[in-house]
Image (cartoon, helix red, strand yellow):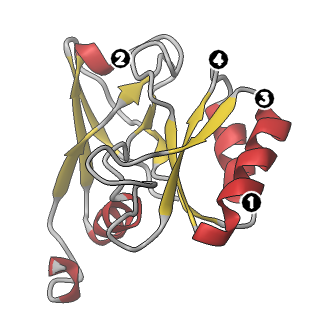
Amino acid sequence: MAVNRHVKLDVATNGADEVDSDLSLTKGSRGCLAQEKIVAGCAKPFIIIADYRKVSKNFGDQWKKGLPIKVIHLAYMPVSKALVSRFKGVAELRMAILKAGPVVTDNGKFLLDRKFDKLHNCRTVNSAIKRIPGIVTLLGLGYVRQQQEDWLIATVIKR
């Protein structure tokens, strides 16, 4: 990984899966959640670029696959049950298409896709999800600083 040789990056860019009307965003659908988070942490700034097709009033209007959440193998059932108990809806283990069994990330973890009917108050939900034991990371529900007319060009606010 390049960040092992270049710990400070001048800039890094990526896209978003969906951006809501409050300018909260979600990304990570390809499953490289931890790696993307590491790159974002090394970059000054980390810029998200998305066009109007990614913008929605509420999460789930555009991106139908759910919020990707990386979990350790042992925890995927307890985490799934905790998510459904706390937030209702569905949390599904992502299954591979070209092999038998679940998707295994580059770091050897499983992915849960958490589907919400309508996701409101993203900051509260994000904070609550991160506290569930067994979750490695979720690279989503970040926050945007600026928006232009047909394009969303965002600098992710680092907390």
Please provide percent x and percent y for residue 32.
33, 59
Sequence-earlier tag: 3 or 2: 2
Residues at discs 4 and 3 in contact (Cβ within 8 Å) = yes
Q: 10 Å neighbourhood of mark 1: few (<14), some, or many (≥20)?
A: few
Does residue 81 appear left or right of residue 98 in this picture? right
Please provide percent x and percent y for residue 154.
29, 37
Please provide percent x and percent y for residue 35.
33, 67
Quickly name the residue at label 2.
Answer: 55
Q: The disc labelled 1 sits on which kind of residue?
A: Arg
Using the numbered discs, state the Cα–Cα distance from disc 3 to disc 1 in whole angstroms. 17 Å
Sequence-earlier tag: 4 or 3: 3
On residue 117, which mark appears?
A: 4
Quickly name the residue at label 1.
Answer: 131
Camera-nearest label, 2 or 4 = 4
On residue 16, which mark appears?
A: none
Q: 10 Å neighbourhood of mark 2: few (<14), some, or many (≥20)?
A: many
Residue depicted at x 78% and y 33%: 87
Residue 33, picture quadrant: bottom left
Residue 38, picture quadrant: bottom left
Camera-nearest label, 3 or 1 = 3
Q: The disc labelled 2 sits on which kind of residue?
A: Val
Does residue 127 appear left or right of residue 72 in this picture? right
Sequence-earlier tag: 3 or 1: 3
